[in-house]
């Protein structure tokens, strides 16, 4: 294990690592905003519209990346706990080989069909669509390296990867647009950015040693089996915290739907902050579980940290909603301030749910899925049936988050109680 990873052990290391990931996430978010600010002011309106729409497509394509990164982080953390960094290297190599051809095929198919996609999206350049293919190919591979760094608990490398991605994207965009590449250059900047993100985590992987083929194959099979429950968990959580915007888009007039979507963009900042805590918590919990150690202290620290940081974020959004809404979206969105206030508060119950889901995944316990998945389905149905107004939707989101958090916590304690009863009988 690297010295940086060793320093991340214990209470002080957990706080330090969370601080590193939080600062890196904030910096990466600022750089992303700066990229859009520069592109919007230096491209024609139609060209920036193409870039913005394609980056949204890239974002959706990147959602499965969180599944891959979570599964690899857990696998590598368990291998490190067992002193088998050779297994971690085997998982890394097999994951790259397993994803390489799908990445090439998906990206290649997008580039080849770019003329058709250009017409479907009403884009103004076939080349700006075509360059999106390599972006998605690299995006499919990126979580392998980031997951390995996360599993090794090298959060400095993980944070640098996020920051380097933002710096290179902004710098390449400025240079290419200045050279006259226009929207193609702005979109192509993401190719260099993701490549830089991969390079940034390489130093942390030097501790991985060669592995026997048989051991690596067994570990890789276990990794693939874990992908399904991880995908189910993240999809269930995503439905609870995101499906409301889609429901409002379907059932409400365009102006109200646009106002709600804008308020959700700001209000969900509360959730994004909690990701920094769970990014650190998951590999720590997986490492402790592999060594048969208790991790309740890590869970308690995660609750406190995420509660403090997310609560502070919600307080800022609620207190300065008017200025933030106008500053980000312009004067035409001044009316969304009340929505922003209540939406940011409605996100708070989702914070402990995110912590509980990540904790259970880190421990490899999947009983909570029997609560989370039906709850996500019921939440979606209720939203479709009970949407008398935008504020009623927000109330339902807050209620669902609270109830599901309590149900998941209850399923955890029931599972622990049954395990204790069995151990006493034995």
Image (cartoon, grey):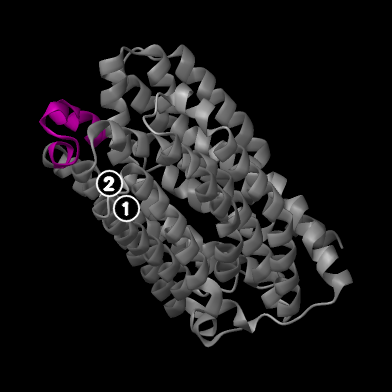
Can you tell which mark lies on residue 32?
A: 1
The answer to whether mark 1 and mark 2 are in CB contact below 8 A is: yes
The crowd level at tag 1 (other Cα within 10 Å; few <14, some 14-19, many 20+) is some
The N terminus - image quarter: bottom right
Q: Is residue 348 left or right of residue 283?
A: left
Q: Is residue 362 left or right of residue 341?
A: right
Residue name at image x 36 percent, y 63 percent = 168
The correct choice, above or below, for 331 with respect to 194 in the image is: above
The crowd level at tag 2 (other Cα within 10 Å; few <14, some 14-19, many 20+) is some
Circle 2 is placed at which residue position? 36
The correct choice, above or below, for 2 with respect to 232 in the image is: below
Residue name at image x 30 percent, y 45 percent = 182
Which region of the structure is painted magenta? 324-342
Q: Secondary structure at mark 2?
A: helix
User: Seen from this angle, which residue lies furthest front?
Assistant: 180
Residue 223 magenta-highlighted: no
């Amino acid at each position: 294990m690297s010295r940086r990873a060793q320093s991340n052990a214990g209470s002080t290391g957990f706080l330090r690592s969370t601080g590193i990931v939080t600062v890196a996430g904030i910096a990466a978010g600022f750089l992303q905003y700066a990229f859009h600010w520069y592109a919007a002011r230096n491209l024609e309106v139609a060209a920036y519209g193409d870039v913005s729409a394609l980056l949204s497509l890239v974002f959706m394509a990147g959602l499965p990346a969180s599944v891959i990164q979570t599964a690899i982080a857990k696998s590598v953390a368990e291998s490190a706990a067992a002193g088998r960094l050779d297994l971690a290297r085997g998982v890394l190599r097999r994951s790259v080989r397993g994803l390489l051809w799908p990445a090439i095929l998906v990206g290649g198919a997008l580039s080849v069909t770019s003329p058709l996609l250009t017409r479907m999206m009403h884009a103004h350049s076939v080349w700006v669509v075509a360059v999106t293919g390599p972006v998605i190919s690299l995006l499919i591979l990126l979580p392998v390296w980031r997951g390995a760094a996360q599993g090794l608990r090298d959060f400095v490398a993980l944070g640098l990867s996020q920051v380097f991605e933002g710096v290179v994207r902004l710098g390449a965009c400025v240079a290419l647009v200045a050279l006259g590449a226009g929207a193609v250059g702005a979109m192509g900047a993401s190719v260099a950015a993701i490549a830089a993100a991969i390079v940034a985590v390489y130093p942390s992987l030097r501790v991985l040693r060669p592995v026997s083929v048989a051991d690596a194959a067994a570990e890789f099979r276990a990794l693939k089996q874990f992908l399904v429950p991880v995908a189910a968990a993240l999809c269930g959580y995503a439905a609870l915290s995101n499906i409301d915007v889609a429901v409002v888009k379907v059932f409400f007039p365009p102006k109200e739907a646009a106002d709600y979507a804008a308020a959700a963009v700001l209000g969900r900042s509360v959730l994004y902050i909690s990701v920094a805590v769970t990014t650190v918590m998951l590999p720590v919990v997986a490492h402790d579980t592999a060594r048969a150690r208790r991790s309740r202290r890590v869970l308690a620290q995660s609750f406190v940290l995420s509660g403090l940081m997310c609560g502070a974020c919600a307080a800022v959004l609620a207190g300065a909603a008017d200025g933030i809404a106008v500053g980000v979206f312009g004067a035409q969105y001044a009316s969304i301030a009340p929505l922003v206030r209540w939406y940011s508060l409605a996100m708070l119950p989702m914070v402990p749910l995110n912590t509980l889901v990540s904790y259970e995944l880190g421990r490899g316990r999947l009983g909570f899925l029997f609560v989370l998945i039906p709850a996500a389905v019921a939440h979606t149905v209720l939203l479709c049936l009970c949407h008398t107004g935008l504020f009623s939707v927000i109330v339902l989101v807050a209620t669902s988050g609270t109830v599901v958090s309590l149900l998941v916590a209850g399923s955890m304690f029931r599972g622990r109680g049954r395990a204790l009863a069995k151990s006493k009988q034995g």
